[in-house]
Amino acid sequence: AKSSGRNGVAFFDPQMQAQADQRAMLTQDLHTAIRECQFQLHYQPIVQQQSVTGVEALLRWQHPEQGMISPAVFIPFAEQTGLIIAIGDWVLMEACQQLACWQQQPELRRFTCSVNISSFQFAQADFVEKVVAAIIGSGVNPEGLRLELTESMLATDIAMVQEKMGKLQTLGVSFSLDDFGTGYCSLSYLHQLPIGQLKIDQKFVRNIHTRQGNLAITKAILALADSLDLDVVAEGVETSEELQQLKALGCRSFQGYYFSRPMPANAAFAKIMQPLNV
Ligand code: C2E
Ligand code: CA
Ligand code: CA
Ligand code: CA
């Protein structure tokens, strides 16, 4: 078999094999993670003027051997294996429970918690029921719950999307369009669906004060949002230069390391309650 070389049937690529092993291991570990509750939510403040108006819940996986694994790594994987459904259910319930707890503070009555929804989750026939179960189970006021969707998941069956979003909107849930500008370019759904907020992707925010292309795109998104009466959050704000440029363009809500990294619930709460000096 050794001599069969590139034309032989016994072709063996150690690198591909290693990748396959790694995938099998990760799948196994994800099953365990769900069973043993190795997930956590961190919360990143969303800032408007001097105060934190809400947070985005971001999933963290504390792997027993490999340490913290980024959602950018394991979410695509969880989607391929279908495990995203169980993980997504947990995220919804956990975020709603945390928000319900924060809502006890009179100052936080209008506070929002944004939750990322995978396209696989949203496409499930019982998605609305899952959200309703998390609302009822946690006792959260649904007015504080904001679901982050992406453009690609809306470009499917518009009637189905309208029905799901409509039912949730009736309960008080609101919707944000994540990574805006990076996905499909059809804008027609923007006024056909109950979307209240656009999030400008961090790739357009990066060095917006020096990069003409990013400046032009961000300006166009802000103008579009203004004419459709949508809120806008600029994501991934890292420097005061970026912030000043965004403010000069009329953007009023921001999220990014410049203000705060995502943090565990207790630390996020301290940040939320403390006035910012920015
Ligand atoms: P996203 O929804 O676009 O979330 C924003 C990402 O940008 C987060 O990465 C956040 O930590 C990071 N970020 C925030 N501010 C800054 C900044 O100033 N600079 C830079 N460089 N990055 C910043 P994270 O937490 O690693 O999450 C990555 C992606 O994983 C998310 O992107 C989202 O698509 C997905 N994700 C996270 N949590 C969940 C979840 O609960 N469910 C689902 N389905 N997806 C999730
Ligand atoms: Ca998001
Ligand atoms: Ca985003
Ligand atoms: Ca993203």
Image (tube, grey):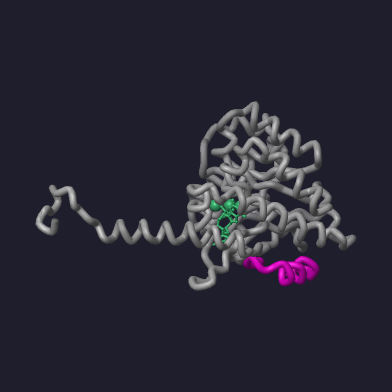
At 70% from the left and 36% from the top, the residue drawn is 165
Q: Which residues are magenta?
A: 258-278
Question: Where 83 sits versus 42, above or below?
Answer: above
Q: Position of residue 69 (x, y in %)?
A: 52, 65
* Residue 259 shown in magenta: yes
Q: Is residue 267 left or right of residue 212?
A: right
Is residue 269 one of those drawn in magenta? yes
Residue occupying the point 62% across, 44% down: 149
Q: Find the residue positioned furthest to the top.
A: 159
- The image position of residue 208, as x and y in percent, is 54, 55
Specify whether 227 is left or right of 216: right
Residue extending farthest to the left is 3
Q: Nearer the viewer, residue 17 or 248?
A: 17
- Nearest the eye: 267 or 28: 28
- Please tell me which residue lies in front, 84 or 181: 84
How far across and how far down the image is residue 91, in percent?
Answer: 66, 55
Vertical placement of residue 203 versus 219, above or below: below
Q: Residue furthest right?
A: 106
Outermost residue, front direction? Answer: 1
Q: Is residue 278 visible?
A: no
Instruction: State which quarter of the image contains the C terminus.
Output: bottom right
Residue at position x 17%, y 48% in the image: 9
Q: Is residue 12 visible?
A: yes
Quadrant housing residue 68: bottom right
